[in-house]
Image: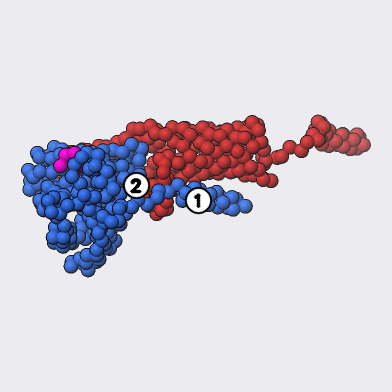
Chain colours: A red, B blue
Amino acid sequence: MKQHKLLFIIFSVLSFTNSFAQTEKQSIKVKHFAVKQLTIEPGIGIHSNFGTDLLITNLVQWNPKKHLAFASHSSYNINNLLQRNFNGIKTEHNYSVNQKFGVGTTFYSKRSSNTFLLMAGVKYTSFKESLVNPDDKNVSAGVNAFSPDYGLMYSLKKGVKKYFFSFRMYVPLYPWPVKATNISAVDGNINNIALEFGAGIKIK
Amino acid sequence: MLLKQIFASACAIMLLFLLGSCKKESFNSGATKEFILQSATNGASYQIKVGLPSNYNPVVEKYATIYVLDGDEIFDFVANKCQQISNDLGVKNVLVVGIGCGQDRSLDYTPTKINSISGCAPQFLHFIETQLIPKIEQDYKVDTARASRVILGHSYGGLFGGYAFSIHNKLFGNYILLSPSFWFDDLVALRQEKDNRNDNKTRKQLVFMGIGEAENAGRMQAPFEAFYQALQKNYFDIKLEKNRERNLDHLGSRNPNIEKGLHFYFQNR
């Protein structure tokens, strides 16, 4: 009886381990493990304008070839999130929606990839402010406008598994030329750089 | 490794911006006179630049004058545009007077004291009225009428222009107010306009107000609109125009609005 029990355990263990064994022949060509063909990378971010804008973003990247990348970037920005009431000026709403498409190239290192993309698309901005003037009348002003949106994007993917760390930086080049290179200036393209972090998912 | 990559990218971006930044504009220096004027009120020294029209003729002509705040930065642009617009329209050009910063601009351009670097607009306006304007009108052949004086300012400079409009309206007849910081000190500019409305509303005025459509920091648009509406509804003899520069922000809209403001002035003065 004891013998039967021992044989059963050995058989079970061997069967179990066999289930993890490689069943296919190993490919002679070693595939670079950092290459990802199709990824989805949701993330959140901020603008460099004092970090008061919250960005909810997503990047879909497709690499049909190792060094050729196409991307679609969507972003919903809640602008000026932390200051909705300032000196009697109330912000009713303030958001923008961006959709861009781009093409670029990817460089690989052992555990990460770096993609540089030229992006172009459209941006819709909507905001409204109001105040009560000294004559006790309510005055509102707002903007609802479409504008071009183009620039450069850098995307870093860190990690080799299905889920990986994703960072990207988008530098708007519209309007061109750059109006202020002074980082402490109130605005200018350099203060509207988007910095985004998130988790990427490798689809293919 | 990660930090290294981010740092390298940031450096590349900075380089791109440096390559793409605007070249500095300069006005024909032969037609520019410069001097330093020390304020008797606060002791600060202001660098003054005077841009003369290309065909300046003091014997037969009298010229209007545009006083430009932040003159260190925008004098050349304004002087060039005045030359160009007056040529295009075939009208007489003006003298452009750039007032450089003698002390922190936030001191000189803000009307009330809310911290250690604000609240000296009354002294600065006094300096302009009692020292600068008399010197310009003595040294150059300019028209001394209120209707021939313009003040142009951007941001805090626009706030100062609004202050001059409300508090000392007799000094300037024309105002080019660009992205004015009317949010300052709980909308003090709007209160000052209302408090002095009865004294000012029958006087002849020319006001151009410009802003960038993308100035969405939750403080610029509503006070701008409130000031504009107050002028539109309550001033009987006013030539008033506003412009929202499409897709441009606080700094980006400055030069396009200067150009439009000058056009409005030359066409309607």
Asked whether residue B267 is drawn in magenta, I would say: yes
Magenta segment boundaries in residue numbering: B265-269
Asked whether A108 or B77 is in front, the reply is B77
Q: How far apart are marks 1 and 2 (CA)?
A: 21 Å
The picture quadrant where one finds residue A11 is top right
> Left or right of B216: which side holds A38?
right
**Around disc 2, counting alpha carbons within 10 Å, would you say few (fewer than 14), some (14 to 19), or many (20 or more)?**
many
The picture quadrant where one finds residue B40 is bottom left
The picture quadrant where one finds residue A157 is top right
> Which amino acid does the dot numbered 1 rest on?
Leu
Disc ID at residue B15 = 1
> Which amino acid does the dot numbered 2 rest on?
Leu
Residue A35 shows in the view: yes
- The residue that disc 2 covers is B251
Asked whether A75 or A170 is in front, the reply is A170
Asked whether A38 or A10 is in front, the reply is A38
Q: Which of marks 1 and 2 is nearer the N terminus?
A: 1
Q: Which chain carries label 2?
A: B
Disc ID at residue B129 = none
